[in-house]
Amino acid sequence: MASPTSPSSLLHLRALRPHDLPAHPLLSPYQTATSPDLSTFMTSILSDATTFMDTTLPSTFRPGAVKSSLPSAARVQLLSREISAGEGKAEAWFARRSTHTPQPSSGNASFAEFEAGLLDEHSLHESEYTPGVFDAWKVLDWGAEIAALSRAGGEGEVGRVGEYKAVVMSVHEMCHHIPFPLLNRVFPVLILSARTPSTGPLNATSSSFIIVQIPVALPSSLASALYSSGRHRQEGDETRKRKRVVRGEYVSIERVKMVGSQIGDGVDGDMDKVVWEMATASDAKGWLPVALQKLGVPGAVVKDVGFFLKWTAEERRRKTGR
């Protein structure tokens, strides 16, 4: 059976500590010589996340309501699953699935726009398109280590690790506004993203990418952390960033996949589509009852689709003038 911190069991609400993470210069005071191998750590998580989306989500989640999320032209299918305490820490998972026409038009986005907004600079863009997220503080990243790994493996492109491309791994502190009288929340997360291998018949395309977020527990003495260290109280660059926060946890797996015919000619209705799926479990901690948290999550994950499509349209107009 996998240990709680082995890669095959990391997709849960169990915060990783520095010694659970691959070696990094900023974490060295808190790590040991037995830190996980970087390549194995990343590929195992990406593989597990892909299996989750391919198998766990469709076979174990219960379909719920189908909702609108304006201005998205696509409707959003809600899904849910309860993991009992007998399987570990009890977790309430919620998921969504939406199918989009891949074109840069009102209520839609091209696959390139999905990549630019969700794969590239994921955390920064999330803070831009989600009204409740007021900061995405980068604590550290493994950019140099991944580049060295690619070179050592003889890969022809930086960021390629095995069958995965454009691999990026970092730790961010994601800050969410919570209505008064509750305190705002900071969610320290490990974020791992990559373009995933193509699958399917030879005459079909299957471009896809995946983003995995796993909770981490950061030491208060870690100088590069802003909120976990308490430095934000003096160094925050605006009033809301200097307020007290409660540290919460969330885990999420998000995948965007383009499926359909290679040429997308529409014969027999075989037009390309973009399928956007996301599954998450969270615990906001503090005085917010879990029952109330569970009531709010489905609506929040549905709204994210509309938030992203609205932001994408604004970015498109900013770049093209139309």
Image (cartoon, grey):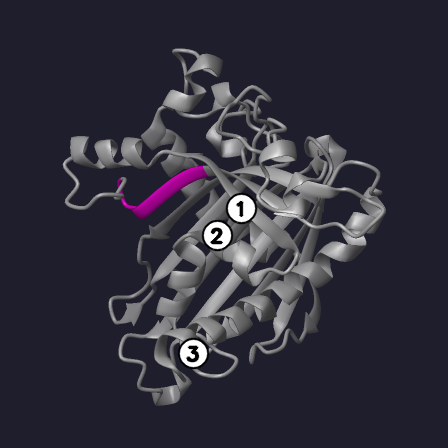
Q: What residue type is labelled 1?
A: Ala
Q: Tell me if residue 227 can be seen.
A: no
Q: Is mark 1 on a helix, strand or loop?
A: strand
Between 202 and 322, which is closer to the camera in this rendering? 322
Calculate the distance from the C-alpha at mark 2 to the C-alpha at mark 1: 6 Å
Specify the label residue 52 is tagged with. none
Q: Earlier in the sequence, mark 3 or mark 2?
A: 2
Q: Which residue is labeled 1 in the image?
A: 136
Calculate the distance from the C-alpha at mark 3 to the C-alpha at mark 2: 19 Å
- Check the picture and name the quadrant holding the N terminus: top right
Residue 69 image offset from top left, x and y in percent: 64, 73
For residue 167: magenta?
A: yes
For the point 26% across and 40% down, which residue is it?
A: 162
**Magenta-colored segment: predominant secondary structure:** strand
For residue 302: magenta?
A: no
Q: Earlier in the sequence, mark 3 or mark 1?
A: 1
Q: Which amino acid does label 2 sit on?
A: Leu
- Check the picture and name the quadrant holding the C terminus: bottom left
Q: Disc 3, disc 1: CB below 8 Å?
A: no
Q: Disc 2, disc 1: CB below 8 Å?
A: yes
Task: Check disc 2: other Cα within 10 Å, few if <14, some if 14-19, many if 20+.
Answer: some
Q: Which residue is labeled 3 in the image?
A: 317
Magenta stretch, residue numbers? 162-170
Between 173 and 305, which is closer to the camera in this rendering? 173
Q: Is mark 2 on a helix, strand or loop?
A: helix
Q: Which residue is labeled 2 in the image?
A: 124
